[in-house]
Image: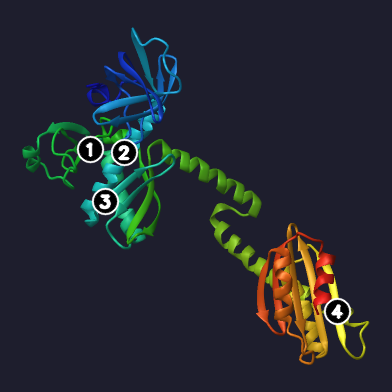
Amino acid sequence: MTVKQYYQDAYIKSFHTYIQEQKLGESGWYVVLEETAFYPTGGGQPHDTGTLQDKRMINVEEVNGEIRHYIEEPFSDISGVVKGQIDWERRFDHMQQHAGQHILSAAFAEALQYETISFHLGKEVLTIDLNVSDISESDALKAEELANRIIREARPIETKWVTQTELSDYPLRKQPTVTDEIRLVIIPDFDYNGCGGTHPRSTSEVGAIKILDWEKHKGHIRLQFVCGERVLHQLHRKHGLLKELTSVLQAPEETMVPTAKQLLVKQKEQEKALEGLKDVLLTYEAEGLLGTHKDGFILIQKAYSDRPIQELQKIAQHIISKREEAIVVLVVQNDQKLQLVAAKGSLPTINLREVAQKVFPLINGKGGGKESFVQGGGEAVMGKEELLEILVNEL
């Protein structure tokens, strides 16, 4: 079996070894090494990347005890010594995040008796699922403060291999899922946990922990946080956004929230006023369509381009509210969509719904309504004027 150097020393950045075999699997070419410092995906921690000789390492996984190193292309010759180079920035980030997760989960357990039931290490943030249905801001802050105190105390992070019978000697947060080759990650007098991941030597190397947000997820609380260098990345990004917003809002950071709220109130007032003006204009437009029809039966028809169907509805409703004998047929084309509105006053006896149902199939469309008012749409398989002509003929 491959010797797992990442368990001997998580700080190994490069190593030399021999290739035992090279195979083409379902996921591509991979090699099995005599020794490896490349960590395979497992325990919530993503795999390492880097290079093996001149080949880029794209994935590492352990399958039935075999550590498979997937490379972008096969070696032409697998004899001789090869050099492995770890992407150290990625590895150390994973070490910081994974250790930070242990610390934060232990802090929630110690301060609040909240159990962590799952963990995910993503590219930008980490998540843990807490076995509670709700959490307060003060609870989150309490656990975060304890976690960061443990980091500042620079406590050692130890690893130890134990047997199942030896587990009772340690106050574990939860029982390991394996029964042999059990590896414990220990922060003395704080956290004892079965784990196969890579970790730094001291809690101080985690740097800091910052909780970002949380949400309810399947009856539990899913909490988002970052550790180490990711805290600085988050701070840098959000500080940049704040600087940009202070410039856009022309307000200092301390008054940014009330300034933004005031702008939103003004925007809603302006939108309401604009909607009122649009209604007035639509009323004038409807009156203009009525202007050439003084007495007797009225059929008003018109085709438009690039207008919301809601405007056509308002025009039609205004006309039939003014003239009981009116029938209104309006068509609009918006991009590759044809839409229609038909309405009638109380005097015409025609059933507009029956008329529309004959027309909708011609444009691969659908719609609905009642005898006196229908609307719907479909594909622009014909011109808007042609559709309007068909509707009028059906009437």
Locate the N terminus by quadrant.
Answer: top left
Q: Residue furthest top?
A: 80
Residue type, numbered disc 3: Thr
The label on residue 300 is 4
Under circle 3, the secondary element is strand
Whether 309 is drawn above or below 250: the answer is below
The amino acid pointed to by label 4 is: Ile
Tag in front: 4 or 1: 4
Q: Quadrant of residue 214?
A: bottom left
Task: Identify the residue at image location x=52%, y=44%.
Answer: 239
Hey, which quadrant is residue 34 in on the image? top left
Q: Which residue is mark 2?
A: 98
Q: CA distance from mark 3 to mark 2?
A: 14 Å
The label nearer to you, 2 versus 4, is: 4
Disc marking residue 345: none
Of the image marks 2 and 4, the number of the one nearer the N terminus: 2
Tell me which residue sits at (70%, 84%) in the image: 371
At which x and y percent is residue 89? 41, 28
Q: Which residue has dot 1 on it?
A: 195
Q: CA distance from mark 4 to mark 1?
A: 76 Å
Name the amino acid, label 1: Cys
Q: Judge left or right: residue 318 versus residue 257.
A: right
Residue 281 seen: no
- Name the disc covering residue 116, or none: 3
Task: Tell me residue 242's x, y (percent).
Answer: 56, 48
